[in-house]
Image: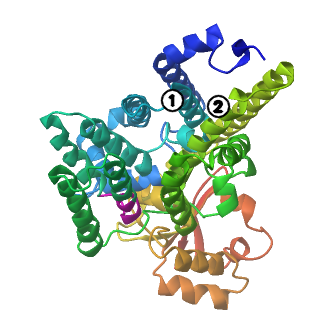
Amino acid sequence: MNRQDLIGDHKYFRHILDHQKKYLLLLLVTIATTKLISNYYGGNPSIVGGESYYYLAASLQGPIFNPLAALLQIIPASVHFLLPSLTAAAVLLLFLHTAKRLHISEKITFFSGFFAIMSPVFMLSLVSFFGPLFFLLLSLTGFSLLLRQDKLRYWSLLPFISAAFFDLFSTALLLMLLALYFFMKKAVWEKFSLLTLTTLAFMLIFNGVYFRQPAVLGPFHIQHVIPDLISDLGGWSGVGFFTIMLAIIGLFLNWKKKWFFIALPLAGLFVIGFALNTQSILFLSCGIIGFAAAGLVGLFEQRWALPFIKKASFLLLLLGVLFSAAVYADRISDYPPSEADINALNWIKDNTLPDAIVLSVPENSYYIQYFAQRQPVFSLRDNYRRQTALSATIFSSAYIEELFPILEENNVSIIYINEEMKKSLPQDQGFLFLLTNERFKLIYSSKNYEVWRFR
């Protein structure tokens, strides 16, 4: 077979590889701009997702040690909508810079960047405040400084320490990455290496004991493990099916290589983190995307008996990735909060007592905290299993004798019903039917959004 058939040797693809920073950045900016314009003209907020409003609500409080919430306290609210896209662009540029310094194949680098931008978890981060992505920004900033050979490498400690203030899992991941890097450079016992590793280990213990950081911050939505991994099954984010298929190919093609065995501890940590909490999907996605890029390059750098089949397969796989991304991008526009959500929650803020406790499904908790500025009954990031079990008990209650004691025990005074609850809960029995009881009073109604008072 002619060498011109091999991936990367075609003149047009060679041009893309030579200017991959420009093309990848243009792709990212196009997607981000399209989503922001779509949300604006659709009447939806530019920022979506429960995690975003957790950080926004935290930024309204006093001093806070989470780097993302602290940044939201500093920058004006009028430019908050730009932060996700700027963070994603900075992560992309730092990744390309670091990959070049580490002499990673430009083909692997390009397809890793391309699959990342096309991945649902990354697209969601363009319109939401995503803690793991901000952690990735700080970590890559640290590594870009660490790779320098002058005194500036000591400044890498600053972003590394800042990155340790999210949760214990991400700090442990960063510590393992640094240990692997120093081990491969045969520099584990150098003074700077020991200083860096000791500092991160101290931060891991200090934040766990003093600040009582969770293992993984979140979740901020009801977890469904398989859909949260494979976005095509309707999950909140995740990775597309075709990307996962390419990652499996990458595993088979590269299992004998040295770097594969070095990556195994990290892959194990990614899987453990995702099993504990699907909020850590970004880290698992990075591993999947890396193997997917290696799979695509490895598959098409092999010799094929029929070049036409090779080109058709290459096109089919890329179209599959693009199709999954397009379907997911269209779905983001429906993510909460909607304009009607915001109107109802603002009404609660203006027309209820400041100490009112609001009952709604757990997914609405962070919108209630930020827009209504009231205490919700549920907070998914605190004792997730107990919260989801209590929610299931309340919203499946069929009798007032069962429901009222629970509402009284949790000091519920306001109930917020949105359109999604109207669709998911039965109308002729259960919780919505019980609202006809005289102890409930409808005090706000607009379209399919209602606010009730419980006496």
Residue at the image position 54 percent from the left and 82 percent from the top? 407
Of mark 1 and mark 2, the one earlier in the sequence is: 1
Label 1: which secondary element:
loop
- Residue sitting at x 33%, y 58%: 175
| Numbered badge on residue 297 | 2
Across and down, in percent, residue 38 comes to: 59, 28
Which amino acid lies under the numbered mark 1 shown in the image of this protein? Ser
Judge left or right: residue 242 versus residue 384.
right
Q: Amino acid at mark 2?
A: Val
Q: Which residue is mark 1?
A: 105
| Residue drawn at 73 percent across, 67 percent down | 425
Q: Which residues are magenta?
A: 165-172
Q: Are marks 1 and 2 in contact (CB under 8 Å)?
A: yes
Residue located 62% across and 51% down the image: 236
> In this orientation, which residue lies closer to the viewer: 434 or 267?
267
Q: Residues within 10 Å of mark 2 (few under 14, many from 20)?
A: many
- Residue sitting farthest toward the top: 11
| Relative side of 203 to 27, left or right | left
Q: Is residue 419 visible?
A: no
Residue at the left extreme of this rendering: 151
Give the SS element for disc 2: helix
